[in-house]
Every structure is written in structure tokens, then in C-alpha cells.
């Protein structure tokens, strides 16, 4: 289904968000999207600036299963794309979240359930699988070693950018009411590693996570 989303093209929307939108389906290898999320930030825009809205095609089943705080999704008209390039119409759903800029990473995880892919989008270096597959109490030496490698490779400002991405993803997860254990495992792993890296880089051990 995720591959189908990548092949979706939507007609440009006007300044007023429509109730439904025509989309072009270029990949018919799986179910077509049922809705178009119009994602925008819960932060108020600066004066004289328009609120930025980004459109994301989605399948209602994927999000309804995972998101306890999802807005009510309008029932879409049955749509089947029989060939590539076919146009269908889907309902538009306004979706207000804290950090729209990291919504694609969270959305991709809900489709794939790939912790490695999610961490790859949040972390500056590939995360050793043992950090999220093994017992957390047994991997602290590896966590410290990995954090040291990151601290030796990246500046404090770069670490802070990645920490912001993790925190933003956490905020979206809370706002949408997602209780997926693997997602929380990935966020916990990224947070512990990056805070430990920051503690090493700044020489502030009080930032270091307990046990690291």
C-alpha cells in the first residue's frame, strides 16, 4: 500500500480546502488511498503568513487501527483503479498535529512497522539492531559506545537537530494517540542514544540517561 501512495498525484487545491480531491493513481498493485489528509501545524502561523497545509494520501484502515485520536473520517465512495493513470476522488480530512514536518516518517512506520527504517530517518548513523531487539538492561555498554561514535562524528548543533526530530515525532505520536509498542521502543532508543551523545559532547553528565 505504501508503494501505491508514492505514485499518487493530486490536483492542486485552491486557497480553500475542498471536501474532496481528485487524485491520479499511477500504481495499482494494491488498494488505492481512501482519504487525503490535509496536515497542518497546531502552532499559530506568524502574522500576515498563511497557514501551511500539506496533503498526504492515506488508507483509512491503517490510521484507524493505530490512532486513537484520529478525527472522524468521512465514508469514502467505493473506488477501484483498474489501470495506472486513472483518476479517483477521495475525501479530504484536516489533520492538526504538532509537527507536520516529521509526519511522513511516522506515516511510513505505520505502514511498514520497520523500526530500522524509522530510526534511519531520525538518527544520524545506522542504529545497531541490538539496541532495540535485545533486553534494554543488557545493551547499555553498546548504547554508550554508539553514542560515543555519534558524539565524535557530529557537532552539538547537529545532535540538537536530531533530538528535535525525535521529540517532534514523539509529540505527533502522543497527539494521534498511537500505542504501538515498536514505535515507542524506537523513540526510546533514539532518545537515550542522542541524549547520551549530547552529554558526551557537552561534558554535561546530568544529560546522560540513567544507566548509560
Image (tube, helix red, strand yellow):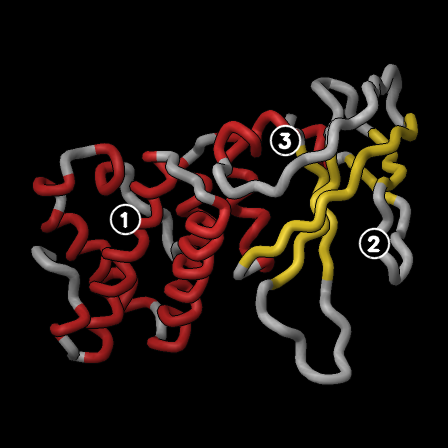
Residues marked 1 and 2 touching at CB (< 8 Å): no
Q: CA distance from mark 1 to mark 2?
A: 38 Å
Q: Residues within 10 Å of mark 3 (few under 14, many from 20)?
A: some
Q: CA distance from mark 2 to mark 3?
A: 24 Å
Upstream in the sequence, badge 2 or badge 3? 3
Identify the residue under disc 1: 189
Kindly state the secondary structure of the residue where label 2 is placed.
Answer: loop
Upstream in the sequence, badge 1 or badge 3? 3
Q: Observer-nearest residue: 168 or 40?
A: 40
Question: What is the number of the mark on residue 17?
Answer: 2
Identify the residue under disc 3: 2
- From the image, state whether disc 1 or disc 2 is nearer to you: 2
Q: Name which quarter of the figure residue 30 lies in.
A: top right
Q: Observer-nearest residue: 95 or 109?
A: 95
Residue 167 placed where, x, y %? 40, 60
Question: What is the number of the mark on residue 176?
Answer: none
Which residue corresponds to the image point at 46% horizontal and 40% vertical from the top-left?
Answer: 117
Which residue corresponds to the image point at 51% horizontal and 28% vertical from the top-left?
Answer: 65
Residue 73 placed where, x, y %? 68, 35
Which residue corresponds to the image point at 29% horizontal and 61% vertical from the top-left?
Answer: 194
Image check: 174 left or right of 18? Answer: left
Q: Name which quarter of the figure residue 37 lies in.
A: top right
Upstream in the sequence, badge 1 or badge 2? 2
Kindly state the secondary structure of the residue where label 1 is placed.
Answer: helix
Amino acid at each position: 500500500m505504501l508503494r501505491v501512495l508514492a505514485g499518487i498525484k493530486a490536483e492542486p487545491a485552491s486557497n480553500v480546502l475542498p471536501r474532496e480531491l481528485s487524485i491520479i493513481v499511477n500504481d495499482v498493485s494494491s488498494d488505492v488511498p481512501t482519504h487525503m489528509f490535509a496536515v497542518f501545524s497546531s502552532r499559530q502561523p506568524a502574522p500576515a503568513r498563511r497557514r501551511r497545509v500539506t496533503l498526504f494520501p492515506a488508507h483509512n484502515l491503517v490510521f484507524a487501527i493505530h490512532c486513537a485520536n484520529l478525527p472522524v473520517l468521512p465514508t469514502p465512495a467505493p473506488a477501484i483503479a483498474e489501470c495506472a493513470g486513472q483518476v479517483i476522488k477521495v475525501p479530504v480530512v484536516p489533520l492538526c498535529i504538532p509537527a507536520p514536518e516529521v509526519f511522513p516518517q511516522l506515516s511510513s512506520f505505520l505502514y511498514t512497522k520497520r523500526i530500522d527504517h524509522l530510526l534511519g530517518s531520525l538518527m544520524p548513523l545506522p542504529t545497531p539492531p541490538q539496541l532495540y531487539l535485545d533486553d534494554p538492561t543488557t545493551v547499555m555498554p553498546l548504547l554508550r559506545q554508539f553514542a560515543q561514535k555519534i558524539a565524535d562524528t557530529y557537532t552539538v548543533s547537529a545532535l540538537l537537530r536530531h533530538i528535535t526530530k525525535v521529540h517532534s515525532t514523539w509529540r505527533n505520536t502522543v497527539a494521534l494517540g498511537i500505542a504501538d509498542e515498536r514505535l515507542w521502543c524506537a523513540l526510546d532508543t533514539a532518545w537515550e542514544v542522542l541524549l547520551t551523545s549530547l552529554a558526551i559532547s557537552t561534558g554535561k553528565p546530568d544529560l546522560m540517561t540513567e544507566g548509560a
